[in-house]
Image (spheres, rainbow, N blue to C red):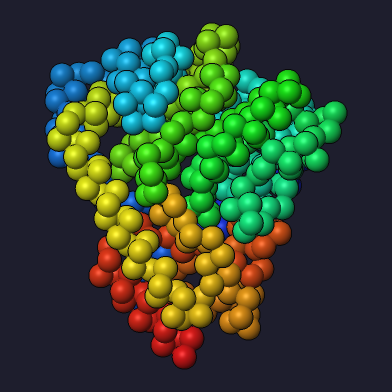
Amino acid sequence: MPRLATRTNDFLTFQVMELFKQAQALQAAGKDIISLGIGEPDFTAPPQVVEALERAARAGQSGYSPSAGLTPLREAIAQFYHEQFGAKVDPSRVIVTAGASGALTLACAALVNGGGEVLMPDPSYPANSNFVLAAGGVPRLIPSTAEKRFQLSAQDVARHWTPATQGVLIASPSNPTGTSIAHDELAELLAQVRARDGFAIVDEIYLGLSYEGQPRSALTLDDDVIVINSFSKYFHMTGWRLGWMIVPQDMVAPVEKIAASLAICAPTLAQHAALACFSANAMKTFEHRREAFKQRRDYLLPEFERLGIQVPVKPDGAFYIYADISNLGMDSAAFSQRLLLEAGVAAVPGLDFGPAHGRHTMRFSYATGLDRLEEAVARMGRLLK
């Protein structure tokens, strides 16, 4: 067997996908499993998008696109950011990617030096550490608290920045917590990073799924941040593998050069289809679905309280609840397995998102129908009773 690179030992196992495989095996064996695990909307692309895909396929529009993406799509994304999130963006700064994962891969390849540290909060989406590792960097998880909404703060940046630190990677709203960074606090954090000549990668893939007030992009605070977004969550196109990044003008050419080698381009048919996402009718559909997610959140929060499952911070976005199970008498790994095997409910142990709170937290996804959530709550109630 070839000798593997040492970094393979450092890569984190994505427990969400391991749980997903276990749940699928149980379903294949005939067991009814309600998934509160994987972060995938139960909604799919609306008819306008599917029809646009079919038209593009019949027209033979399946060749390579420019490495930065189709110009009309880049223009539509820039307009979307202006109308929805208050950020004026030159379309030339938009780079269409193979999902948000492709965007994060490109961002880390362009910014992270070998041995360079990248600060991120604990808890965080586990794959973020792996993107940094793949670029030769060192992810540093900084334990956060409920008082900080489980987010990185300006004080954290000032306290933990070292000569080896190059930047920060944050998400607002966050996976796994569903919490956002308040706009004034985000401004302070970005100012601390800028003062140290560092970079800030801001994951905004759940920004469209914000439930409290009008969401604003980090680009309204600092034009030099690197913003990551995707068609997977708000637009419900997970398997289409289409995302984008918005970068400072000086980064466009270097990132485009890297993209041309690593991926050539994002899936072209998906790009043509995604143009239909920005039609008036499609946007009405997405907004209606956003309200459905909010309804699910508002159903689950009091039900969890009734079951004795504590939620330290009310999520204001995404479709996750980060819950504290300290008073249930078992750690998160054991509770996750009991939920799956005894109640037929899949939910992710907090250890997947960092060690600081991992043993006594769980992440529950409400990206499934309200009727199934009601049944999941009933099953959990019987188990806990």
Quarter placement of the N terminus: top right
Viewer-closest of 233 and 149:
149
Q: For the point 60% across and 62% down, which residue is it?
A: 350
Vertical placement of residue 316 versus 166, above or below? below
Vertical placement of residue 372 versus 170, above or below? below
**Residue 281, how many percent across, how many down?**
15, 35
**Residue 267, how many percent across, how many down?**
35, 26
Q: For the point 76% across and 34% down, which residue is it?
A: 117
Q: Is residue 329 visible?
A: yes
Q: For the point 71% across and 47% down, which residue is it?
A: 141
Q: Along the horizontal axis of the image, is 86 left or right of 360?
A: left
Viewer-closest of 151 and 228:
151
Vertical placement of residue 375 versus 37, above or below? below
Q: For the point 14% across and 25% down, which residue is it?
A: 55
Q: Quadrant of residue 88?
A: top left
**Residue 351, how many percent across, how many down?**
64, 61
Q: Quadrant of residue 197?
A: top right
Viewer-closest of 76 and 295:
295
Q: Along the horizontal axis of the image, is 131 left or right of 160?
A: left
Q: Is residue 18 visible?
A: no
Seen from this angle, which residue lies furthest right? 163
**Residue 313, how many percent across, how many down?**
54, 60
